[in-house]
Amino acid sequence: MRRARVLLAGIAALWAVQAIAQEVVTSAAPERVAVTVYRDPERDPDEEPNLDWLNGYALISETRTIAIPAGESTIRFEGVAGGILPQSAIITGFPEGIIERNRDALLLSPATLIGQSLGRRVHLRRTSNATGEVREQEAVIRSGADGALVLQTAEGFEALRCTGLAETLVLDGVPAGLSARPTLSVRARAGRPVTATVTLSYLASGFDWQANYLAHLSEDGRRIDLFAWLTLASQDETSFPNADTQAVAGNINREDVHAEPRAGGALNLQCWPQGRTSDIASQDMPQPAPPAVAFDDVYLSEAIIVTGSRMRRADLESSTPIAVVTAEQEDLGDLKLYRIPEPVTVAANAQKQVALMTRPGVRAGLVYRSWLMPHDEDGDGTPAPTTQMLVTRNRTADGLGLPLPAGGFRLFAEAMGRPILIGEGFLPDRAVENDVEIELDEAPGVTTRIELVAESRRWRDYRLVVASDRPVPVRFEAEFMDTDARFRPARRLARRNGRPLWATDVPANGIAALNYRIRIRADGETD
């Protein structure tokens, strides 16, 4: 008997030691946080980010001060990004390192609250629709919340909210293992109590960014005032207030790794009435929700938030919008980093916009361009619209001379005292000294047609005619594709990208023409 008492005392002492060793310390939030956003590497430059499925990512670095007890303890980092990739986490600052780390995937929600209470006693509270009387009884949860929630009471089994009465469940407490916010926990060991400054860095999915360019064309059509927004987007449920924020441009190799799914969600309860569907009175269908604002629909929105300052639409209707804060560009190896010079809030499920650049008086111009296959033309004289292009060079002499990250592009011109949208397109990444050519829209007012002038057994003569209904002269370029020795223009042409290029000025409300001959290859003849 005495040996049994000693054994029980030893077990109790062991439990006490384990309880001390498993002391839990919670860090509710970081003191400082930095967020660096990377673009979706799979997204094409002319593709808008999908706000419902952001496939970029962010590097998040948090600094926290933690009181670490002696012995083994569990340290909980609450408020990390919901899309955290736990395998990417780097934790420094623990005096003796860490033993293991875990991502607490069970977030507190109606569904997980029921799931973690399976088989437990709860309180079923009912309210009479007629009298308002509230009646409460005990029940045991016997199923999960996927489709129906089955309860066992003293009267038998029933499904929650299928009696026609107002019903709800009341729990005595939150089941163990549920976190109100995304949490990363680690097991650490320390020889003595210590207060440590710990840095937690990790990758998280559900972020993206791009540039959004606004250009105002001068009256003579030879210069633009260029302005750009840096637009950050977060699909994560965690907000990062007062964060040091950066965006990185460039191509980064990234393996296909996704965040673990987060458990949780709303209850999905369905009850089918006993009777026929024709017995149920019809109801008016609810009105659909208004359409979501496009990712880059920043110029036409009534108000936007720029680093905490609200700007009216009227402020944007100048040739160069007022920049509250402008991102600073830095080199990061072969990449480009755009640093926001003051802390900003990267809010949950939201977008943030900061001025990226302002460049007034950039030398640029509109060009109308066509790409033609001279061998395949029928010469029937059918008019075809040209494509309006905005062209410039990314060099200091032309008013630019800085890396241009990819993004949407909108071109405005002055009409009746206010800016009017005249074209929009996409700008791919462009390095310094590169040509910048932005394809805007089709231009039905400037058309081309190819006429068959003459032909014989060995050749055909064509005339390319470009006609403009513009009241001012326009610049036109025709690039001939897939040419060989059989293509013989009537005048010497320049070359671009190895292809013949005809560039000319078309007079106001006038035409310009180019004659060329196509030699017909004889049977068995090769070039």
Image (tube, rainbow, N blue to C red):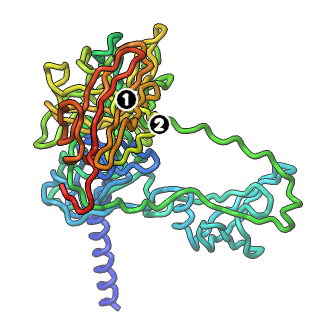
Horizontal placement of 304 versus 364: left or right?
A: right
Residue type highlighted by circle 1 = Val
Residue type highlighted by circle 2 = Thr
Q: Which is more N-terminal, label 2 or label 1?
A: 2
Q: How crowded is mark 2: few (under 14 residues within 10 Å), some or many (20 or more)?
A: few
Query: Mark 1 falls on what kind of element?
Result: strand
Farthest residue in the right direction?
A: 279
The residue that disc 1 covers is 465
39 or 469, nearer to the observer: 469
Please report the residue visible at 19 percent of the width from the left and 58 percent of the height from the top. Answer: 526
- Residue 274 lies in quadrant: bottom right
Percent position (x, y) of residue 281? 86, 53
Farthest residue in the front direction?
A: 457
Please report the residue visible at 75 percent of the width from the left and 46 percent of the height from the top. Answer: 285
| Residue 125, above or below 484 | below
- Residue contact at pointers 1 and 2, CB within 8 angstroms: no
- Residue 414 lies in quadrant: top left
443 or 217, nearer to the observer: 443
The residue that disc 2 covers is 382
